[in-house]
Amino acid sequence: QVQLVESGGGLVQAGGSLRLSCAANGRISSINSMGWYRQAPGKQRELVAIIFSGGLINYVDSVKGRFTISRDKNTVTLQMNSLKPEDTAVYYCNGDIGRWDGGRATYWGQGTQVTVSS
């Protein structure tokens, strides 16, 4: 089995910074991609940032220049600067991960709340 364990998040004023981390644990043979999604109340879940095993990184336009995704082994980090109230959402870690048994699946973290006050 594979688990994604998130940390970070919380309450911050507009213009502030937060860092989210997500560690992938378990019988992992490969990580094809890891990323962060978010879901605000009444809205669909959207991709925020993703990093692929080859190093390619994509961001949603609304966070470009403010958020930075990075990965070190089995941990992915999202550094969020210049936060805006519209960044308020539950943030979910996501991983496309291969297992020792040869299987491959998409895994999700439990979600962490980010609230930006104006």
Image (tube, helix red, strand yellow):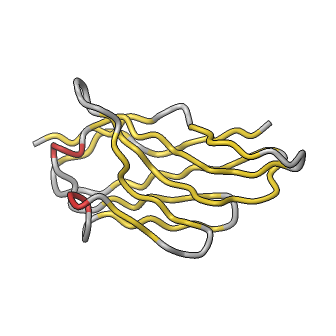
Image point 46% across, 45% down: which residue? 8
Out of 8 and 45, give the one closest to the viewer: 45
Q: Measured along the vertical axis of the image, is residue 18 above or below residue 66?
A: above
Out of 10 and 48, give the one closest to the viewer: 48
Farthest left residue in view:
118
The quadrant the N terminus occupies is top right
Which quadrant holds residue 45?
A: top left
Q: Where is residue 116 drawn, in percent x and y? A: 21, 42
Image point 70% across, 38% down: which residue? 3
Q: Where is residue 14 drawn, in percent x and y? A: 16, 50
The quadrant the C terminus occupies is top left
Report the number of numbered marks: 0
- Does residue 68 appear left or right of residue 16 in this picture? right
Which quadrant holds residue 73?
A: bottom right
Farthest top residue in view:
42
Farthest right residue in view:
101
Q: Measured along the vertical axis of the image, is residue 107 above or below residue 77?
A: above
Q: Where is residue 38 drawn, in percent x and y? A: 36, 41
Farthest bottom residue in view:
55
Image point 46% across, 40% down: which residue? 92
Image point 40% across, 58% down: which residue? 49
